[in-house]
Amino acid sequence: MNYKRRKQLTIRTPEGVEFSFLLAGPVSRCLALTIDFFVKIVIMNVAATISNIFKIISIDFSASFLIISYFIVSICYSITLEWCWQGQTLGKRLFRLRVIDAQGLRLHFSQVVIRNLLHVIDMLPVFYLVGGLSCILSNKAQRLGDLAANTIVIYVPKIEQPELDQLLKGKYNSLRRYPHLCSRLRQNVSPDEAEIAMQAIIRRDDFDPSERIKLFEEIAQYFKTKVIFPDEDIENVSDEQYVRNVVDILFSSTQREWAESKVQV
Amino acid sequence: MIIDVKNFIAQEQKYWDELDQLLNEFESEPVGIGNLGKLKRLHYLYQRASADLARIMSFSSERLLKENLESLVSRAYGEIHETRPVINILSFFQKFFLDVPIVFQKYQINFVLSCLIFISGSIFGGLAVSLDPGAKEVLMPFYQLQQSPQERVAWEEKRTTDPLQGHKDTFSSFLWVHNTQVAIMIIAFGITWGIGTVLMVFYNGIILGAVAIDYFNAGQVKFLLGWLLPHGVIEIPAFLIAGQVGLIFGNAMIGWGDTTSLQQRLRRISGDMMVLSLTVALMLSWAGFVEAFISQYHWPVISYNVKIGFGILELIVLISFLYQGVSSSNELQKKKTTNN
């Protein structure tokens, strides 16, 4: 999964529990910024239309309204949306980004204001060069505004369960005859290892036939060392089928039921 | 260690749902719910979810469940471990005018420093124009200031038409926007350990010093005062306060004599920076209005004495506001500190 390669911010609570946030990279932030830029242009066009209506009353007032509107929109757009949408603007929402406090605490209004006021520095000298460089060099991917306001921008991944029903439906899983070994397998396998097995199954048709055989052989050998199932149940099972059975045990039982129960709630 | 994940989920699901609902309540009412029972329950549910997360970590192929629990624990962590007072926007604006003098006086030393930098710039600008009149073209980037003071005064006093007729609102808005942008730059440059702020305040001082000495040497002091005082007594302090904010920011970046981390220092000043920045914006909007509607009209339209008197009155009001109730402000501040 590509987001696994992103920078992460891990927070350890006093209770000893760790949770992590995926930090947003400069490219996704730049794209969100571009969307916001176009949204601002649309709002400014609306302001220009309203300003034209005011020309009936006074041309002076109309021009004044336009100048102030442009300024207010450029400053207040991000401040208002980030405060009202808990750290998101329209662009950020589209790219699943969110501004949060750098220590995982609640985002304060003053933080929102300061990070947006410092846009003027991050924009220097052209095309957000200072902000972009700061974002690349900082270990928390912070632009100067984030550094000053003590905020970070995180990527909120969409957790999509693969269509396991489609992949595993109708296949007999001989490993399920040993519930105690299945439980042990679930305990011994790390999330990254489980992810590799699942991705291999999902993408199996994309591999060259010879590479596919090699890959599943390696993965199957690895999982066979995790928990040893009786020989009579695995000797006639192909490597790919073995990996498929492992994925079935790891993902399809409790997770599917749990996800279904969440939908019902 | 969890043996039966299905049973574990069935057992704990109701607590996670309850925590989710409670967090929604807390998040939708950011001022905080003054119900001790609910707070205790939130704390209990947070600890329970934390323990569940720790248990599921050892059963880590349950990725969806883990992500969900992480999200719950992180939200609850944010609510429980936050020690800064929660600011409600409505109450912020209600308290704003009470807070300004307190915050301003709290960082008085930064304001004095900002004034000293500005005065140094003015002296430098004044000396530069006195010693080298050719420097005027470089130091004063506005056409209006390139004329000789005598020529300008004669032109202003003889004119019969209103040069701003039909443009006053536009001019006022332009001034506010331009000055606010400059003030934002002064504040934002605090991130350069205050160096950018110092340079910008110094440069603004140079312009004022050069203009002042130019008119003083030409014997046009009354015109100068009548022209600058009505808006300048608000505009210049606004830039000085912007300089004060930039210096507060720069000081937090450097952290002299402060053993706390940069994050903590910046966290401590963020609320105060916001109050003073908003004050600057408000002051500049008033200054822009006065500059467009009063400052640009000279004798015989408005007497110089009236304009100077108006400027002095504004200054008295501003000083009284910023230094109002020093003792009561201090008490309030002490109270605030004790509460925190």
Image (spheres, coloured by chain):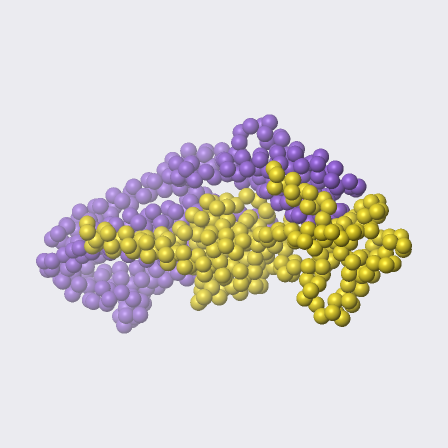
Chain colours: A yellow, B purple
Q: Please say whether residue B186 is visible from this viewpoint.
A: no
> Which residue is more in the foreground, A5 or B300?
A5
* A92 or B319, nearer to the observer: A92
Q: For residue A86, say whether it is visible.
A: yes
Above or below residue B15? Residue B281 is: below
List the single residue furthest toward the front: A170
- Give the residue drawn at x 90%, y 55%: A231
Residue A229 screen position, x and y as percent: 86, 52
Horizontal and vertical percent for residue B116?
39, 55
* Left or right for A44, reference A216: left
Q: Position of residue B49 (x, y in %)?
A: 67, 39
* Residue B202 shown left or right of residue A143 in the figure: left
Which quarter of the image is occupied by the N terminus of chain A?
bottom right
Residue at 44 percent across and 57 percent down: it is A36
Q: Is residue A28 left or right of residue B168?
A: right
Q: Position of residue B153 (x, y in %)?
A: 16, 61
- Residue B326: image quadrant is top left
**Residue at 62% over, 58% down:** A3
In this figure, what is the number of numbered marks?
Answer: 0
Which residue does the image show at 74% across and 67% down from the upper left?
A: A212
Classify the position of the C terminus of chain A by image quarter: top right
Q: Residue furthest bottom?
A: B134
